[in-house]
Image (cartoon, rainbow, N blue to C red):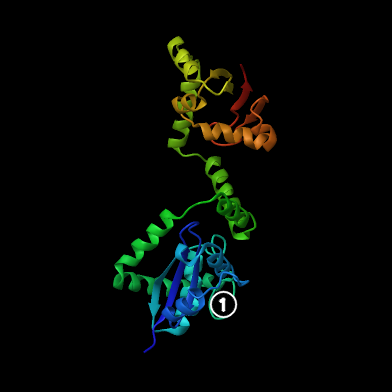
C-alpha cells in the first residue's frame, strides 16, 4: 500500500521552511528540488530561494506519513503549515491541502480528528514531538519575521477580538476586586506614603546612572524623584519598569517617546497603580 508523506524543507541560513505533500518524497526531492538550475527563472518562493542560496543550504526531512491520502493532504498538510507558520515565516504560498479552503481547521470535528491523529502518531513516533519542539525553539526570529507577524496579528480579526475581550475581562475583574487584591493595593499604598530613599541609596542609584535621565513619580499625593535606574525603584515599590514605560508610550507619540532629550509625562490608567503619574526628563 502506498505511503503518503508531509515533508519540510528548511533554509539553514534563515530557518524559513516550506511544508509539502507527496506520494513519493524521494522522487519529489530529486526531480523538483535537487535538479534546480541556477540560470533558470522560478516563480515559486521555495524554488527561487534554493536557486539563490544553493541546495546545500537546505535540509529536506519527512515529518509525517500515513496510508490515508485524503487525511494526509487535506488535514495534516494544512496543520503543519499552520504549526510551523510557513505562510508568514516561510515559503508556502497557500494554506495547503487538495483544494483546502481557508478556515477548514476551525471546525470542531476537524480539530478533534487532528488531535486524535497526532496523539497516536506521537505514540508511534516519540521522537517527532521533541523534534517539532526543538525546531520551534531554534527558529531564528529575524526583524523581518517579527514585523510580518506583527502585521498579520494587526490584520487578524480574531486576534483583535481576543485583545478586546481580554481588556474587558480585566476591567470587569477590577470593578469588584477580591479581598487579596484590595489588601495588595493597601499594602502598596502604605509603602509609598512618606517613603524616602536614604543618602547611600540615592548615591548608589546615581553612581549607576548612565542614562542621564531623571524620573518623577507622583502617586497618592506623594512625589518621588529618581536619578538613575527606574527599574530598581519600580521593583522596590512593587511595580516594574515596563509598566511605567508603557504609561509614557500610551500618552505620547512614538517620536516623542524615542527622543530621549524631550521631557514627557504619562499616566497609568488602570490597575492598582491607577492615577500614578510618571515624568521622564533628560538631565546632564
- Camera-side residue of 56 and 197: 56
Could one spot residue 197 in this view of the protein? no
Could one spot residue 150 in this view of the protein? yes
Residue 28 in the image: above or below residue 246: below
Residue 186 in the image: above or below residue 83: above
Residue 50 in the image: above or below residue 266: below
- Please tell me which residue is depicted at 65% across the width and 57% down the height of the picture: 155
* Quarter where residue 174 is shown: top right
Question: Looking at the picture, how far across and down is residue 266, in whole percent?
Answer: 64, 30
Question: Looking at the picture, how far across and down is residue 132, in whole percent?
Answer: 39, 62
Judged left or right of residue 252, residue 210 is left
The total of numbered circles placed on residues is: 1
Q: Secondary structure at mark 1?
A: loop
Query: For mark 1, what is the residue?
Result: 100
Find the residue positioned furthest to the front: 39
- Please tell me which residue is depicted at 39% across the width and 80% down the height of the picture: 66
Judged left or right of residue 255, residue 18 is left
Find the residue positioned furthest to the top: 199
Find the residue positioned furthest to the bottom: 1
Question: Looking at the picture, how far across and down is residue 151, in whole percent?
Answer: 63, 54
Residue 20 in the image: above or below residue 247: below
- Please tell me which residue is depicted at 48% across the width and 63% down the height of the picture: 84
Question: Looking at the picture, how far across and down is residue 226, in whole percent?
Answer: 54, 19
The quarter in which the C terminus is drawn is top right
- Camera-side residue of 74 and 268: 74
- Please tell me which residue is depicted at 57% across the width and 61% down the height of the picture: 88
The quarter in which the N terminus is drawn is bottom left
* Quarter where residue 39 is shown: bottom right
- Camera-side residue of 234 and 57: 57
Judged left or right of residue 154, residue 120 is left
Amino acid at each position: 500500500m502506498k505511503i503518503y508523506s508531509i515533508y519540510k524543507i528548511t533554509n539553514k541560513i534563515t530557518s524559513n521552511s516550506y511544508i509539502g505533500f507527496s506520494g513519493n518524497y524521494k522522487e519529489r526531492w530529486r526531480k523538483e528540488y535537487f535538479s534546480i538550475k541556477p540560470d533558470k527563472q522560478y516563480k515559486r518562493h521555495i524554488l527561487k530561494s534554493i536557486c539563490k542560496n544553493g541546495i546545500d543550504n537546505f535540509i529536506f526531512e519527512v515529518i509525517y506519513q500515513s496510508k490515508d491520502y485524503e487525511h494526509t493532504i487535506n488535514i495534516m498538510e494544512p496543520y503543519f503549515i499552520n504549526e510551523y507558520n510557513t505562510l508568514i515565516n516561510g515559503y508556502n504560498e497557500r494554506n495547503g491541502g487538495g483544494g483546502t479552503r481557508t478556515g477548514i481547521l476551525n471546525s470542531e470535528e476537524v480539530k478533534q480528528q487532528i488531535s486524535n491523529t497526532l496523539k497516536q502518531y506521537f505514540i508511534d513516533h516519540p521522537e517527532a514531538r521533541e523534534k517539532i519542539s526543538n525546531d520551534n525553539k531554534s527558529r531564528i526570529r529575524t526583524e523581518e519575521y517579527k514585523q510580518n507577524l506583527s502585521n498579520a496579528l494587526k490584520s487578524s480579526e480574531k486576534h483583535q477580538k481576543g485583545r478586546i475581550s481580554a481588556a474587558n475581562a480585566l476591567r470587569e475583574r477590577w470593578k469588584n476586586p477580591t479581598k487579596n487584591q484590595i489588601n495588595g493595593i493597601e499594602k502598596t499604598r502604605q509603602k509609598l506614603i512618606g517613603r524616602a530613599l536614604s543618602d547611600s541609596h540615592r548615591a548608589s542609584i546615581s553612581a549607576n546612572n548612565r542614562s542621564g535621565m531623571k524620573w518623577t513619580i507622583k502617586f497618592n499625593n506623594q512625589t518621588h524623584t529618581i536619578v538613575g535606574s527606574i527599574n530598581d525603584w519600580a521593583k522596590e515599590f512593587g511595580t516594574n519598569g515596563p509598566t511605567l514605560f508603557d504609561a509614557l508610550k500610551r500618552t505620547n507619540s512614538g517620536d516623542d517617546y524615542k527622543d530621549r532629550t524631550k521631557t514627557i509625562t504619562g499616566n497609568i490608567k488602570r490597575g492598582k497603580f491607577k492615577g500614578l503619574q510618571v515624568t521622564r526628563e533628560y538631565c546632564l
